[in-house]
Structures are given as C-alpha cells and as structure tokens.
Image (tube, rainbow, N blue to C red):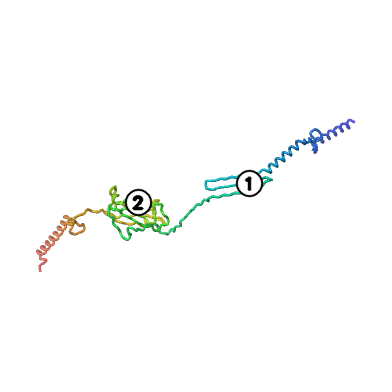
C-alpha cells in the first residue's frame, strides 16, 4: 500500500514538472498566462495619431534649389522638387562652363638636317668690309635652317689678335630679320681693352647655350655663318712731301742704305782683288 502511494505521488510530481515546462500557446494557466485586455481608448488614440502622421507625411512637399559657382567659371544649377505620396521626385540639372584645354606642340627635327645660322644682308657676305674705328657699324642678317627659335640671342664681335669678344647686343629678341648698330666711337672712348686694327668675326648665338657649343640640327649655332670683317684705326693727315711708304724702294732707312753700300763695296773689292791676283800670276795671259 505504501509503495502504491509513493508511485502515485511520483507520478503526480512528474506530470507537474512536465506541465510547468511545456510551451503553452497562451503562456500557461496562471498569473501572466492570460493576455491583458486592450484599452479601447488608448488603441483608438494610437491609431488616430498614426493615421494623422501618415497623412501629414503623404501631403508633405519639399522644394530645394542649390546654386554653386566654382573658380573654374563653372556654374552649377540644381533644382529639385519632391512630393511624397509614397516617394515621388523630379530633378532638373543644368551645368554650363568653360572646359580647360591644354595645348601641346612638338617639333620633329631630322638629325641629318643642317644647323641654324645667319646669312648677312648688310654688309654683303661676298666680300670683306673694312670699318673705321670710331664710326657706327651696322649689321643686318636673316636666320637660316632654323627649326627651333631661341628665346633670345647674344651678338658679339670676336677678335683673334687679342682673343677678345666685344659684346654688341645681349638678350636680343629674335625676329625674322635681325639688326644691330655698333657705336665703335663710344666704345673706344671708355674701353679698357681698345679695338685693334685687325679682322673680327660677327657671332650670333643662343643665350641658353655657350658660344662654344657644337652645332645641332635645327638649332642656332655660333659655329655656322660667322661673318668676317676688318677694322682699322685712322691715321692723322700727312703732307705728301713728308709721306714715307713703308713698302716703297725709296723709303729705305739709313741703316738699310749703309748695308747696301757695304755689300756693293765688298763685291767691287773682291772682284778687283781677284783680277789683280789673276793678272800677276799670268792666269789671264794669252
């Protein structure tokens, strides 16, 4: 009997444990297992508030205009209109401006082409011209075989006698026809190294290069087209009766005359001595 009662109690305890752990659809049978009855006033208020919010959102209209101007002279205009029933929008955009254009240029030069130089117009290059030191000297020239134009040029007159280079013009703008006037009188008055009676070479060269740079195809070269001219210092006037020609026979110095007289005298003495000796020895006897 006691065993039967224990079996019943164990069975009841097991069933209680299973029922408390079982996932009932309404949360169980006690306390919070029953849903709380909804307050009709609060539910109506919530539904009315939600309906009002949806209506205000649906009838809301937004309009925006944005205008911007940047430093590249571009003007952006953006106009947008949006009306929310669910999602409705219209967007209109206009963009005007100047596009940037970068121009690049390249020159193709044949490596076998001639180097650039100058061709004299004044004076003509067919002959050497001599200028008097103290007067203005004018040079006019054209550029030849020039594919690359220098930014500027220097113009000098080179004298080989004293290894000097006299600057006629510096940083001179390059034009189709170049010209320069050299005031030799003004230079000679204040010159520390005066002009000499000698031959000079006119040289026109690129300011970005050395005067001794080798010639290159299409580029201005100082080694191509140099013009040779002469310069001399004028002598004071000498009357004709006082003039002595250095290359004339009548302009021999006293020393030269004495030397000639001595030579002729020695020749006469030698001939006379040989004739006397030959006569005395009977060499000339017949």
- Residue that appears at 11% across and 66% down: 284
> Which residue is labeled 2 in the image?
169
* Depth check, front residue: 275 or 188: 188
Q: Nearer the viewer, residue 24 or 81?
A: 81
Residue 73: image location, x then y, percent: 52, 48
Q: Badges 1 and 2: C-beta atoms under 8 Å apart?
A: no
Question: Is 5 positioned to the left or the right of 194 in the image?
Answer: right
Q: Residue furthest left?
A: 280
Q: Residue at x 66, y 47 (%)?
A: 88
Q: Between residue 51 and residue 247, name the one nearer to us.
A: 51
Query: Which residue is pictured at 88% across the width and 31% down the height?
Result: 5
Percent position of residue 237, x then y: 21, 54
Q: Residue furthest right?
A: 1
Q: Pick out the residue farthest to the top.
A: 2
Q: Secondary structure at mark 2?
A: strand
Q: CA distance from mark 1 to mark 2?
A: 71 Å
Which picture quadrant has residue 23? top right
Q: Residue visible at 61% across and 49% down?
A: 92
- Residue 186 is left or right of residue 93, and the answer is left
Q: Is residue 278 left or right of residue 132?
A: left
């Amino acid at each position: 009997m006691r065993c039967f009662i224990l079996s019943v109690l164990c069975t009841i305890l097991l069933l209680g444990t299973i029922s408390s752990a079982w996932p009932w659809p309404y949360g169980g049978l006690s306390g919070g297992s029953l849903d709380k009855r909804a307050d009709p006033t609060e539910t109506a208020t919530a539904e009315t508030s939600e309906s009002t919010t949806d209506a205000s959102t649906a009838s809301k209209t937004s309009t925006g205009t944005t205008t911007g101007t940047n430093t590249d002279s571009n003007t952006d205009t953006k106009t947008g209109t949006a009306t929310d029933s669910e999602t409705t929008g219209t967007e209109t955009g206009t963009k005007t401006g100047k596009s940037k254009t970068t121009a690049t240029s390249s020159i193709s030069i044949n490596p076998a082409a001639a180097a650039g130089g100058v061709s004299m117009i004044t004076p003509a290059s067919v002959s050497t011209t001599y200028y008097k030191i103290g007067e203005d000297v004018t040079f006019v020239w054209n550029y030849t075989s020039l594919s690359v134009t220098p930014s500027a040029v220097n113009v000098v007159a080179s004298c080989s006698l004293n290894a000097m280079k006299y600057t006629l013009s510096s940083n001179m703008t390059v034009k189709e026809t170049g010209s320069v006037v050299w005031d030799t009188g003004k230079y000679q008055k204040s010159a520390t190294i005066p002009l000499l009676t000698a031959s000079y070479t006119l040289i026109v060269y690129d300011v970005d290069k050395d005067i001794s740079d080798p010639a290159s195809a299409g580029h201005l070269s100082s080694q191509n087209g140099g013009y040779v001219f002469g310069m001399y210092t004028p002598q004071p006037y000498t009357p004709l009766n006082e003039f002595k020609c250095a290359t004339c026979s009548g302009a021999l110095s006293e020393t030269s005359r004495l030397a000639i007289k001595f030579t002729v005298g020695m020749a006469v003495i030698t001939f006379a001595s040989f004739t006397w000796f030959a006569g005395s020895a009977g060499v000339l006897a017949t």
